[in-house]
Image (cartoon, rainbow, N blue to C red):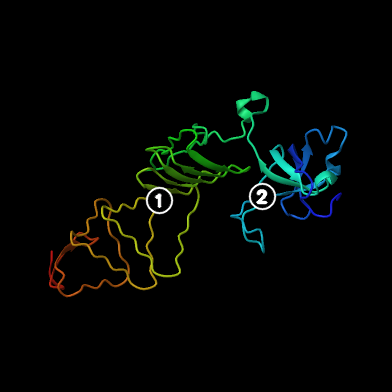
């Protein structure tokens, strides 16, 4: 350094384009080809690694905090921590561009700009997407692999959407309706008690079979009764009837068994 104290020299800032992100120290550093500094004759390997400045909301200590997410081609602005020596570049941030005015290379997601580019194949009663975003209200995070998070504040169409590139997603629409979809198997594992409550009807539908198993007992309370609209009920093992139960059922041989107060009173 040409001065005794860092920061005493003039503030030397620059613009550049990221050319490498494979930091051997895994610190999120990048190699930036700096405009008016690195000409075409300078190889990427000869460019110094630049640290990336993180916001104060990221602790950046002991594995806690956010991680840098620059990509090859990112346009960045930075400064030299060592002033005129220009050996210690620091990236302050990136900025969006439209290279060659080609909208297909626009830096910002189509989802942010008001165009839904996520195609979903509905299954069963799955409702259509609630996407109705307008620029600039839809805050989006899009990864290289195609995962997306949307925090949409479009007036009268606010929405939260977490999307996996496979097609699985969670979406909350403007009214608060929640849709959860998995395009393959799904697991809901609770190490404790789970309660499901709805103030209205509760429908369970399956394109295959439904298995209900318990390590203890199964209790069904239905003041309106239990109705089987199609098919038959088949049992195995011993059937018990609690005293007080009354009614009738038909056996597989066609006989009708009448029960009153838990006792069989007639078979015809």
Q: Is residue 230 left or right of residue 190?
A: left
| Front position in the image: 254 or 136 | 136
Can you give x and y, in whole percent of width and height, for residue 103 in the image? 60, 26
Vertical order, 77 against 263 (above or below):
above
| Front position in the image: 193 or 156 | 156
Q: Is residue 267 visible?
A: yes
Q: Is residue 148 left or right of residue 228?
A: right
Q: Residues within 10 Å of mark 1 (few under 14, many from 20)?
A: few
* Mark closest to the chain's N terminus, 1 or 2: 2
Res 132 quadrant in image: top left
| Front position in the image: 154 or 127 | 154
Q: Residues within 10 Å of mark 2 (few under 14, many from 20)?
A: few
Residue drawn at x 66%, y 40% is 94
Residue drawn at x 45%, y 35% is 133
Q: Which mark, by number, is residue 160?
A: none
Residue drawn at x 34%, y 53% is 204
Of tags 1 and 2, the one toward the viewer is: 2
Vertical order, 28 against 261 (above or below):
above
């Amino acid at each position: 350094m040409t001065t005794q104290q860092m920061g005493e020299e003039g503030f030397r800032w620059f613009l550049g384009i990221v050319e490498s992100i494979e930091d051997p120290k895994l610190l999120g550093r990048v190699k930036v080809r700096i405009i008016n500094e690195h000409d075409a004759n300078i190889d990427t390997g000869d460019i110094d690694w630049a640290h990336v400045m993180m916001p104060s909301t990221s602790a950046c200590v002991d594995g806690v905090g956010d991680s840098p997410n620059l990509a090859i081609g990112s346009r960045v602005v930075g400064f030299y921590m060592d002033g005129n020596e220009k050996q210690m570049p620091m990236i302050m941030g990136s900025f969006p561009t439209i290279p060659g005015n080609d909208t297909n290379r626009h830096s910002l997601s189509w989802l942010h700009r008001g165009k839904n580019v996520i195609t979903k194949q509905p299954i069963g009663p799955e409702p259509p997407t609630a996407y109705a975003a307008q620029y600039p209200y839809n805050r989006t995070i899009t990864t290289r692999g195609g995962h997306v998070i949307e925090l949409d504040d479009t007036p009268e169409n606010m929405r939260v959407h977490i999307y996996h590139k496979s097609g699985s997603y969670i979406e909350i629409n403007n009214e608060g309706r929640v849709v959860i979809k998995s395009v393959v198997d799904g697991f809901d594992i609770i190490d404790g008690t789970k309660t499901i409550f709805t103030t209205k009807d509760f429908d369970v539908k399956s394109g295959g079979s439904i298995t209900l198993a318990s390590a203890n007992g199964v209790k069904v309370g239905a003041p309106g009764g239990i109705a089987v609209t199609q098919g038959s009920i088949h049992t195995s093992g011993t059937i018990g009837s609690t005293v007080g139960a009354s009614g009738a059922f038909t056996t597989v041989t066609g006989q009708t068994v009448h029960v009153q107060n838990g006792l069989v009173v007639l078979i015809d």
